[in-house]
Image (spheres, grey):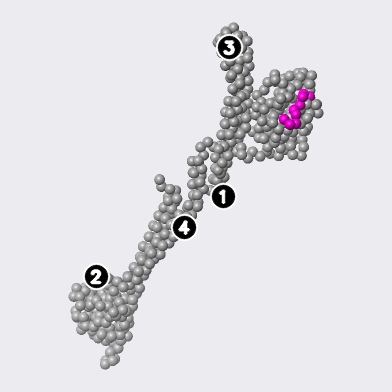
Amino acid sequence: MKSARTSILGWVLIPVSLAMIAALALTSALLTQNVVTKTDQQLSQEAQELSLLSERAIDPESGESYTRASELLEIYIRRAVPDNDELIFVIVNGEVTERTSGEVGLRLDRNPEFVSLVTSLDEPYLGNYSFEDASIRFVAIPVQSASDTGFMVAAIVLDSRMRSIQETTLQLAILMLIALAAAALVGWIVAGRILKPIRDLGAMTRRVRDGTAPERLSGFNSESEIGGIAKDFNRMLDRTAEAFDSQKRFVDDAGHELKTPLTIIRGHLDLIRANPSEEKNSMPIIEDEVLRMTRIVKDLQTLTKSSEPSFIQLAEVIPGDVVDEVFVKAAALAERNWSLNTVDAKPLALDRQRVVQALIQLVDNAIKHTTDKDSIEIGCRLNSEFCEFYVGDSGPGIPKDSRSQVVSRFVRGNWTSEDTEGSGLGLAIVSAIAQGHGGEVFIDESKLGGAEVGLRVKLDKPSLEGKE
């Protein structure tokens, strides 16, 4: 499988390589054009010097300008100083009469084909010619007089000049290859560092099978894109682990708590099967256990949802309105001496339904631990940091050494009477609602003589980090 590292490097190096090749070809073409241009300028200079000579040269015998082409060309070639790769010669009446050259060994002047080409011209000509595998750039200037006709030929061998271009191009190509190799090496290292968190992400994803892997991505700049991905992935792992833990607790709790009612139901069904006359006595027990299981499952579902982002839905709510609503509902649940204690407060960011659910649960607990002659108070109060919703009663209260345990799942204290119904999940649900609001459950002595249980809610907007 092709790695992302190789793909990134390839997509970077391919256009860079193409750009280098294009740059190399363009450089070679520009250098070649520059050589040709300078060569043409040099040949044009030779033609201009001949033209100036024809205008200014004076015959010392007659004191006038030269009238014969052969004489003018002879003077020109004697004065000419060719470069090392340059050849200059003159043709008079179809014959080469004079020549001068630098270090050029080619005898273009002895090539009949080239001489015939030059003598066929009737106007100046600048062009190319190939001779003995050499590329030659030449200019031919016809010179005519009344008595004869001649030609001045200046030729430059381009091979040596082009050879220097080839050497320069080769050196440039080697430098580009070295630069490309260095860029590939640096790109490979940089791509590896950039992709490291993604590789770690993939490796960790493969290791995470049950959502409980303790590893987390770390060591990345949180302000970068990769750091943001790592941070989001860690949050996802936290939520996944929390969901797995919640599911595991649900299964464990359900298996633990449903075992007893299922055993009771099965026992009574066996009894009915063995003795049908026991159906009348057993069916109420079976129905009661079914209702108990339904209540347990419902409470467990509520606790499971407490880890979901949608468990708490905040809105602006006046605390006194919440307490008034609970008081009206509670008064219809049982015959008690009910009292209400509320305060005037500005609206707070609360989930009205969840807070009412928590208070109703506390009211239900208070009813179970009191009698018709006892008193129950529902209220709320403010301090500097929290708004406290509470339910107090005149019942037996909760011992101090048991208060930290009763908010756990399926925990009942030994002060609870045997005939008191309940799943043991009530205060755990209240605690989950309090934590969803950034608060906690508190247990204290009530001024009525029994227990006072409530939930504290932060006055500022609660932090829901981790429930996103």
Residues drawn in magenta: 391-402
Q: Secondary structure at mark 3?
A: helix
* Above or below for 349 versus 411: below
Residue drawn at (23%, 77%) of the image: 107
Mark 4: which amino acid?
Val
- The quadrant where residue 173 appears: bottom left
Task: Tell me if label 2 and label 4 are in contact, CB under 8 Å.
Answer: no
The residue identified by callout 3 is 271
Q: Please identify, in this view, whether the residue under mark 4 or under mark 1 is nearer the observer.
A: 1
Q: Secondary structure at mark 4?
A: helix
Mark 2: which amino acid?
Asp
Spatial separation of the CA atoms under disc 4 and disc 1: 22 Å
Residue 127 x, y percent position in the rendering: 28, 71
**In the image, residue 70 lies in the stretch drawn in magenta:** no
Spatial separation of the CA atoms under disc 1 and disc 2: 67 Å
The residue identified by callout 1 is 219
Badge 2: few (under 14), some or many (20 or more) residues near its Cα, within 10 Å? few
Q: Earlier in the sequence, mark 2 or mark 4?
A: 2
Q: Earlier in the sequence, mark 4 or mark 1?
A: 4
Badge 3: few (under 14), some or many (20 or more) residues near its Cα, within 10 Å? some
Residue 197 x, y percent position in the rendering: 51, 48
* Above or below for 468 versus 422: below
**In the image, residue 400 lies in the stretch drawn in magenta:** yes
Residue closer to the observer: 347 or 295:
295
Badge 1: few (under 14), some or many (20 or more) residues near its Cα, within 10 Å? few
The residue identified by callout 4 is 186
Q: Earlier in the sequence, mark 1 or mark 3?
A: 1
Spatial separation of the CA atoms under disc 2 and disc 3: 118 Å
